[in-house]
Image: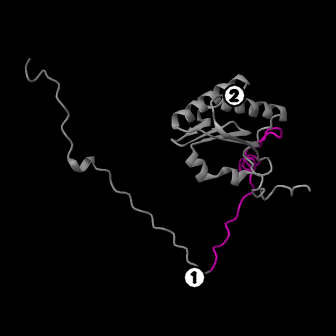
Amino acid sequence: MRREDKPSRPAARPASSRMVPARPIPEAKIIRRPVGAPPKPVPQEEASPRKRQVIAGPEAPASRSRAKPKPAPDRLEQLVAAARASLEDDKAEDVVVLDVTDRASFTDRMIIATGQVERQIQAMANHLEDALEKVGLKLRRDAIQGSEDWVLIDCGDLVIHLFKPEARATYALERMWGPESPAAEDAPPPEA
């Protein structure tokens, strides 16, 4: 093929023709007011119905509330009985059930038990999960939180604490949530 038959490329443009011309920068409008004087209010136009709706936010249905409905007292007692039986089968020591209805807003009952070693505490937690599932309470994945000396199981209206003896003495939850502890600030005074 001869050189003449090849299509020719357009000649390269000079660098100056490829640059975008600079636009003049508009001068900023300077608003002068005396020091310490508040700014003048900007006149507002009447908000459209759509704007008012957006500003007001979404309307929640009246029947929907964030608080879970409390289970029937017999259901709660059924869960406590299942948990207590499971703990007794696993040879838990010093099992205490506290009614914290008037003291705590996050639960109604609290069970505190002691296990001697970490392996026993983990076994108790696994058996509790199975026992609660048998009575119809399936725990969420994050309901069981544990460390080497304390396991917490959150069943909603029932919270279970499994401790090693040293940790139980350190945290002393019975003193904090027991009958001698102060009632919640918003709770009604105890009836005499």
Mark 1 or mark 2: whose residue is earlier in sequence: 1
- Residue at horizontal 66%, vertical 28%? 89
* Residue 80: % across, % down: 75, 34
Could you classify mark 2 by the number of other residues whose Cα lies within 10 Å: few (under 14), some (14-19), or many (20 or more)? many
Please give the residue where the numbered disc 2 appears in the rendered image: 132
User: Residue 35, labelled with which disc?
Assistant: 1
Q: Nearer the viewer, residue 87 or 38?
A: 87
- Residue at horizontal 52%, vertical 33%? 119
Amino acid on which the number 2 mark rests in the picture: Leu
> Position of 8 compared to 36: left or right?
left
Amino acid on which the number 1 mark rests in the picture: Val
Residue 146 placement: quadrant? top right
Of labels 1 and 2, the one closer to you: 2
Q: Residue furthest left?
A: 2
Could you classify mark 1 by the number of other residues whose Cα lies within 10 Å: few (under 14), some (14-19), or many (20 or more)? few
* Residue 14: % across, % down: 20, 46
User: In this picture, which residue range is highlighted in magenta?
Assistant: 37-65
